[in-house]
Image (cartoon, coloured by chain):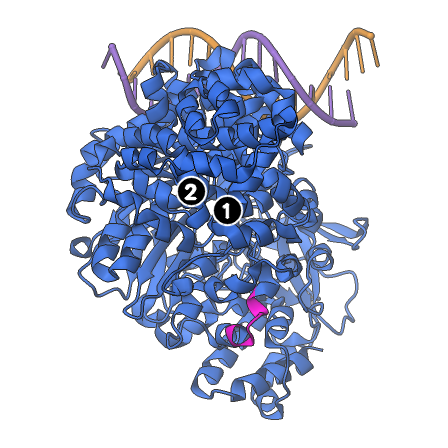
Chain colours: A blue, B purple, C orange
Amino acid sequence: MGNPCLASQYHNMQSSPVISMSSCHQTGYGLHEDNSHHNPTQGYYVPHGMRPNGAPALESPRIEITTYHHQYPKEEVEESGSLDHTVHHKRGVNSIVTLTLPNADGYRDPSCLSPASSASSRSCNSDASSYESGFYNYDNSPQNSPWQSPCVSPKGSSSLLSCPHAPLGPPSTSPRQSPSTSPQIGSQAEEGWAGQGHSGAGKRKYSFNGAPYRQPSYTPNQSPTPSPRGSPRVSVTDENWQTNTNQYTNSAIVAAINALTTDGVVDMGEGIPIKARKTNLDHSPTVSLKTEPEGEEMVRGSELLQEDYISRLPFKKEGYCAGFLDVPQNPYSWSKPKPYLSSLPALDWQLPSCSGPYSLQIEVQPKSHHRAHYETEGSRGAVKAPSGGHPVVQLYGYMESEPLTLQLFIGTADDRLLRPHAFYQVHRITGKTVSTASHEALQSSTKVLEIPLLPENNMRAIIDCAGILKLRNSDIELRKGETDIGRKNTRVRMVFRVHISQPNGRTISLQASSNPIECSQRSAQELPLVEKQSLESYPATGGKKILLSGHNFLPDSKVVFVEKAQDGHHLWETEAKVEKDSFKSTGLVVEIPPYRNQRISSPVQVNFYVCNGKRKRSQYQRFTYLPPNVPVIKTEPTDDYESLGAQGLSVHSKSFYYGQPRLAPVEPAGGADSSLVRGYPPCPARHVSLCGVPASSPESSPTLHDLSPVTYPVCLSASPTHAHAGPLASAAHEAPAFLAQPSSPDRSPLVGLLHSQGGSPHHLGGPRAYQPVYPNGSPSSSSPGSNPSTPGESPFVQAPPYSPARSQARSSPRSLLPEDASPTSLAVTVKQEPQELDQMYLDDGECLEQGVSPDLSALAVDRLTKPWSFSVVAMLFLVLKTAGRKTENLFRMFHLQCR
DNA sequence: GAACTGGAATAACGC
DNA sequence: CGGCGTTATTCCAGT
């Protein structure tokens, strides 16, 4: 790890600044993380996790830093200048040096660090992030702070909470009002980022500076990095930095500092005690300084974080401040924030979109293509909707008068569990054309845009303030712990989260992710993209026509069905007939080719892709051949499709094969999409009511997610990781929504079950982190969430990513094939797919009766793999809901059947 | 003049 | 090691 970092640093080194940042993060993580990354289990979480609060995390990071130091010691330092302060606070030594950085490099690094990296590293990141966040505040801050507030005073505060921005002012209003500020902030922030970055040119190299990378972790913020660039404009004055960087920087700085300390220590041999750092950190005062709104964000972290924060605060302050500036600041935030921080679920945690009466829906999906901008470029504007407008997100079922905060970050769109994208960061857009106020915050090195969700707007937000920043692959890949590769990893999803504090002190965290968005210029212009398909499965006889909707289809586009063995070799490949007559650049009508074996007794999952030429292929899409006599079940009726004019076929949004892990068949309408994307299935019903009970269950239940044929199982596997320790505590916490409300339906039975099981969550993921701290025990709220698990989303699940799997995954699509996936991960219990699910579900009733007991969690997962299974599952849930323990039986049955 | 864009040149990569 | 096709980044210029 260290080395890696170093490397980055070197790059950065040049720019010294970077160093610091990266170091921090990674370092921190690195140590722990690294491991963790590597081994998720590890502890990071554990340590971190646990400590999450504080200490550990911090330390670790720092430690890593140390390493980092070795490599790049000085340089980094320099850059970090801005950071310095921070550093100083903290540590003294290293930090000191580091801090200085100011420049671009620094930010860059930061950016590197922060954002992406964290994400990517995700495992680390996530974990790390968590920690980091803590550290950084940023990360958490947003959430945390906001949250916290909620915690504090549940709702009322929550509002505040919600509005991170709010901190400043009245939540609801403020946010908006703040806009100005926020904008500023944003700008600052952004600029900061940008600013930091030097201008384009140097950037790269500098960026490389190792620093950033390292930081990555910490800084996540780095995202800022980008900005830096973007901002090229901005001069890197210290202030700017701070501000700009602030977030990143701040975090980055902090990270860096930490890193320095740590790394430095390490490297240096100093071996500065983490604590020491903290101590330094403790400077709470500094923090206080920050008071600024940002502070809140910063705060968020767990206890540990706090400390870190403190130490870092300085940075943050600056950084944040900047950002915050816009917003009203509030020193107070600081204190509060912390709580929140800790509490919020890590960004790589999989959260449901519905829980109890609440349902977070993406009413208007973003366009499938959006050219992201580099730091060296100016903004390329906000992500738009196909209609020309902008994406719209709405929270259903929320009747309180308190405004909430909608969080937005850029997530991955591969086949693994949803997690922050290491190579892309959300970019705050401000200006006359922007009607929605927003505020940038860093959470675990991932830039998070906080948008007010106001009752007066019916808890609906038009997302016209979010652009996407591309971080240089080289910068991110150098980060420690980062296992993902940037090349050809250009698809992302917009991930929205909202945390609703409950009267009981718990917080329900919901998440909705958009359909995949292709961010590269070239890909967007040339690669065929399949967004939906009217049928997910059909008898082996084939012959049926399905409608594929997407983009960049050509008259001579070919559709190839492929079946691969788990080892990757092709078992079967055939070109499907494409109706040229009905050709449209956004739609293709294809005749399902007969499967190679007409006698299959169980569903067979294959893939297909649209090919426009040699290397112009779409992502793999899934398709399942059913035994000839099996009734075809449509997964969902997709609204979209119809619109498409499809022949009545329902389309699944599977979207990219990858992307969704889950794919649950999902969803209802538009909302569905979102859901689709996300791990969790959308609530059956879109709206609130929907969520309400039944629906909720489905979604909520992790299981459901799993349903999707996909691989998710894999995700599960990830869980294994969690298994370890860390999570424990968290477990409870973890399940966010779920936990939180016992009563709440949200958790579908499954969820509940899981929880009950206690450890279960862990299984999932381990979430590492979770730590947290929810004082209130709010675990529910946030914390829980996070997990990576994809699929499901079960709250519990954590993201697997990092784990080894992740590494693999990403680049290689091994997972393409579901099968593959499963193997990989799966951990969970999942059995492979039940080939006969069909039958199974058909018999639900029966099954129910049988009752066996089972490991629900596992079960759920397993069976779910099949698409249709989803339906079944949903039914089961419902049943369960109504019939308490029967559920178990059901599950068992389900399980049995599946088998 | 700044924020967007659309294009495209140039640098990197990987085979 | 050079060539080539891709993909990633940086630049430019028009709106």
Q: Position of residue A436 (x, y in %)?
A: 24, 40
Q: Residues within 10 Å of mark 1 (few under 14, many from 20)?
A: many
On the question of residue A694 being in view, the answer is yes
Q: Position of residue A590 (x, y in %)?
A: 59, 52
Kindly identify the residue that appears in the image at 70 percent across and 44 percent down. Answer: A808
Which chain letter goes with mark 1? A
For residue A743, side relative to residue A602 (left or right): left
Q: Position of residue A309 (x, y in %)?
A: 40, 39
Rendering quarter of residue A724? bottom right
Q: Amino acid at mark 2?
A: Glu
Of the 4 image quadrants, the one containing the C terminus of chain A is bottom right
Of the 4 image quadrants, the one containing the N terminus of chain A is top right
Front one among A752 and A832: A752
Asked if labels 2 and 1 share a chain, the reply is yes
Which chain letter goes with mark 2? A
Disc 1 on helix, strand or loop? helix
For residue A244, side relative to residue A483 (left or right): left
- Against A441, residue A357 (above or below) is below
Q: Residues in magenta?
A: A755-761
Name the mark on residue A270.
Answer: none
Q: Amino acid at mark 1?
A: Ala
Mark toward the start of the polypeptide (2 vs 1): 1
Q: Which residue is mark 2?
A: A307
For residue A735, side relative to residue A41 (left or right): left
For residue A181, side relative to residue A253 (left or right): left
Rendering quarter of residue A691? bottom left
Q: Are marks 2 and 1 in contact (CB under 8 Å)?
A: yes
Kindly identify the residue that appears in the image at 19 percent across and 53 percent down. Answer: A457
Magenta-span inclusion, residue A284: no
Name the mark on residue A55.
Answer: 1
- Against B1, residue A715 (above or below) is below
Disc 2 on helix, strand or loop? helix
